[in-house]
Image (tube, grey):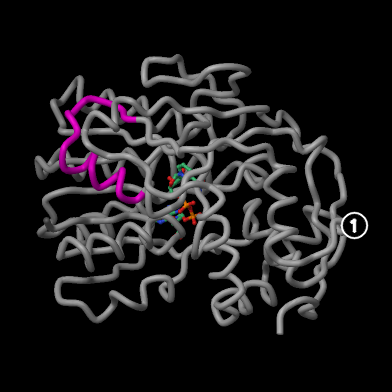
Amino acid sequence: MKLLVCGGAGFIGSNFVRQRVLEHGDAVTVLDKLTYAGREENLRDVADRDGYRFVRGGIEDAAAVADATEGANAVVNFAAETHVDRSISEPDAFIRTHAMGTFVLLEAARSRGIRYVQVSTDEVYGSIEDGSFTESSPLAPSSPYSATKAGADLLVGSYHHTYGLEALICRGSNNYGPYQYPEKLIPLMILNALHGDALPVYGDGMQVRNWIYVEDFARGIGHVLEHGVPGHAYNVGGPDEAANIEVVRRIVELTGASEGLIEYVTDRPGHDRRYSLGSEKSRALGWSPQVRFDDGLERTVAWYRDNHEWWEPIRSGDYRAYYERQYGRALGERLETLD
Ligand SMILES: NC(=O)c1ccc[n+]([C@@H]2O[C@H](COP(=O)([O-])OP(=O)(O)OC[C@H]3O[C@@H](n4cnc5c(N)ncnc54)[C@H](O)[C@@H]3O)[C@@H](O)[C@H]2O)c1
């Protein structure tokens, strides 16, 4: 296939591009604005492959989108602002990228008559105490992040309904794995544990998430792209659920850090208690997750332990100022437990 992958320099997008180029032989153009979360280094191992092209630009920029769409026969859109905490303190970019950006991409796909996959999240359904959400559960987002993602999903659905665009939606649960920016729970805790920094746990730490290893989610998106029915949404959830505090305790064990580093801090405003996805519809397409949480977490800790050169520039750059604003304390600079 000839794919335009928007937001392909981020965490999940870069894992997806790697799979499509190396395992499927697809020609891929990546369109990415390179915000703080996007890095061309994430795509270093595919950059010299035939058919690969990188375009720097925002999905809300019609000229950049027109250039990047040239020759593509499908669009997969990962481009987003993705951190709920940032959506609470600075929602503007979320609205621009998710609303205007999705609109510009949909118009480009419509004018060329090409397939379109929107990468979305379980957070659009809101929190659920028991059971799991299906694709027909109502959308009840809680944060500016999930509300703007839900808005984008509705717009995508309308382009199928109104214009007949071959549009699909793929909703993933919480991802973890290599190349995830350290503001997110798992890499934050791994890197802090390795440095002997405090491990800040929101509220009582009993928020439950349905964890999916990033390569499983990327394969699920590929499956929906190839086999999904236009006009449909597909949930792609992980095989295991765990409360945040359990995740942090496992990271403490795997890194050999001290439990005494765990520190309970003021909860995020409006924090959802539990997410859970039923993924029968995507399983019926022939996809299933391959990596259980214990195994995936071990692999993820090993990746961060072995890839200093990936996270050192982040941890010594603008991320420090973000961390201080968010947690009211500085990050340590010294590795405590890594040799
Ligand atoms: N991380 C998760 O747990 C998770 C779970 C389910 C769904 N998702 C969805 O998957 C997608 C990718 O998430 P991620 O965790 O890889 O995010 P990320 O923050 O790591 O990457 C986002 C990428 O989008 C790019 N980007 C941001 N705004 C852009 C714009 N206006 N134009 C072009 N590029 C832009 C960034 O530069 C970055 O490369 C998002 O749509 C997110 O909502 C994420």
Above or below, 3 against 270 in this view is below
Q: Is residue 59 left or right of residue 48?
A: right
Image point (26%, 55%), residue name: 65
Q: Is residue 272 above or below residue 145?
A: above
Res 229 seen here = yes
User: Residue 133, percent across and down?
Assistant: 46, 20
Q: Quadrant of the C terminus?
A: bottom right
Is residue 278 toward the left or the right of residue 242 in the image?
A: left
* Residue at the image position 32 percent from the left and 30 percent from the top: 234
Q: Dot 1 surroundings within 10 Å: few (below 14), some, or many (20 or more)?
A: few
Residue 71: percent from left, percent from top = 10, 59
Quadrant hosting residue 29 = bottom left
Q: Of helix, strand and loop, which one carries label 1?
A: helix
* 200 lies above or below 162: below
Task: Give the camera-side residue of 72 and 237.
Answer: 237
The number of discs equals 1
Left or right, 121 with respect to 62, comes to right
User: Quadrant location of the N terminus?
Assistant: bottom left
Q: Which residue sits at x=33%, y=28%?
A: 155
Is residue 35 visible to us here?
no
Q: Measured from the top left, where is residue 259 in percent x and y?
A: 85, 56
Front one among 152 and 308: 308
Residue topped by disc 1: 260
Span highlighted in magenta in the image: 218-234
Quick check: is 231 in the magenta stretch?
A: yes
In the picture as drawn, the residue positioned furthest to the bottom comes out as 339
- Along the line of sight, the residue nearer the viewer: 306 or 7: 306
Q: Considering only vertical position in the picture, is 318 above or below 328?
A: below
- Magenta segment includes 213: no
Name the spot of residue 297 as percent of width and height, x first: 57, 56
Q: Which residue type does callout 1 highlight?
A: Gly
